[in-house]
Amino acid sequence: MTTNPVARAGAILEIDLGGIVANWLLLARAAAPALCAAVVKANAYGLGAAPVARALAAAGCRMFFVATLDEGIALRAALGNRAEIAVFNGPFPGTAGEFAEHGLIPVLNEPGQIGAWQSGNQRRRPAILHLDTGMARLGLDAREFTALAENPLPIGWRLVMSHLACADRPDHPMNERQRARFAAVAARLPGVAASLAASSGIFLGPQYHFDMVRPGAALYGVNPRPDRPNPLRPVVRLSGKIAQIRQIDRGESVGYGAAHVMEAPGRAAIVALGYADGWLRSLSHRGCGYLAGTRVPLLGRVSMDLVTFDVSAIPPELARPGTMIELLGADYGVDEAAADAGTIGYEILTSLGSRYHRIYREPPEPGPPGLDPTSTNRLE
């Protein structure tokens, strides 16, 4: 006899595809008339690239970005020919043919990639030109772009793009410096669409939108403006199952290293997930969960497969084996967990593990009103 997967699971991750679509629509409205793409790299920030991209494509998204060729191939299989797919890292040597085979658009980041793309049979296929305007990461520097502009190659540029380094800090002078540099370069490529803003950059204002925006983390509920209330919907709910309840006396220690010592007698719930599931070890002594609407502090260290919460304040009939403790949700979101872990919401999401039983909440039918995707997100 096979049990139901929810009964077998130590933890359940619920992903609200309707919330992701709602966030994309909000960002698309904020950026209009610029087109709104979607970044679904790293398996849609850990939430599942195939179901996320299919939901966004149904809502009208027509351009997706991934990081690697393998991600692009998998996404093409999931989406069919419904959308364009671009690969941020571009082609490594010997892989250009696979871009053509799977209908993927490479982001060309350095002169070697550009030369290889131009010299191959795929040179007439579209490509994206990446410029470094101050991040000193991927992209052509000013000298390399000048050389390219003075000796243009017969490549059909689909887009020219750059990436902001400090967009989540609106007052940082780097934002305007990069915008001005990018605008100057884009002006030297007349007729080529331009894209600068990702999630936080959308909120810097219309002058940062150019022809296309590329939100990523904001789609998944991460706050793009950390100094202000989050305008986006949370889209994940993570619940861990209590495996055991322990009565612990005053003076007894909890977990590895005897790192937590009980100051008073209490009850502890041992929950079946740990850092192997992406509940970061840096949440030791800092994280929390919610049970029956009450905050329950994390006790001691997060271990590989288990974590302990103090449920002393919860009536015993509400805290027993099989009961779920909410680790991420409306009361304790991705950004709050990130703050406790000393990291960013991106890492919390992309760390979410493979052992969770995943439940996808589909968008309502028909899709949310208020945006005509055929008028604002068709790529000509």
Image: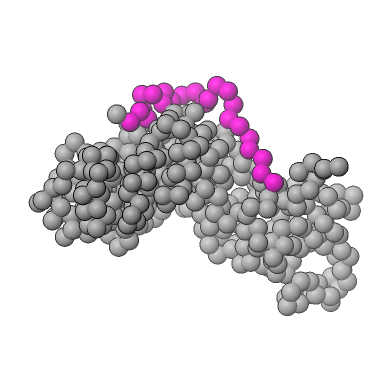
Q: Nearer the viewer, residue 178 or 105?
A: 105
Report the magenta residues as a range: 357-379
Q: Is residue 121 left or right of residue 327?
A: left
Number of dots carrying numbers: 0
* As drawn, 148 above or below 258: above
Q: Is residue 73 left or right of residue 254?
A: left
Q: Residue at x 65, y 63 (%)?
A: 275
Q: Is residue 373 magenta?
A: yes
Q: Is residue 80 left or right of residue 208?
A: right
Q: Nearer the viewer, residue 124 or 325?
A: 124
Q: Image quadrant for the N terminus?
A: top right
Scheme by which the image is coloured: one colour
Q: Residue at x 52, y 48 (%)?
A: 43
Residue 164 visible in this rendered orientation of the protein: no
Residue 77 visible in this rendered orientation of the protein: yes
* As drawn, 291 above or below 282: above
Residue farthest along the left direction in this orientation: 150
Q: Residue at x 76, y 71 (%)?
A: 255
Q: Image quadrant for the C terminus?
A: top left
Q: Is residue 156 left or right of residue 72?
A: left
* As drawn, 279 above or below 263: above
Q: Residue at x 74, y 74 (%)?
A: 256
Q: Position of residue 113 (x, y in %)?
A: 27, 54
Main SS type for the magenta part? loop
Residue farthest along the top direction in this orientation: 366
Residue 85: quadrant of the picture: top left
Q: Position of residue 76 (x, y in %)?
A: 45, 38
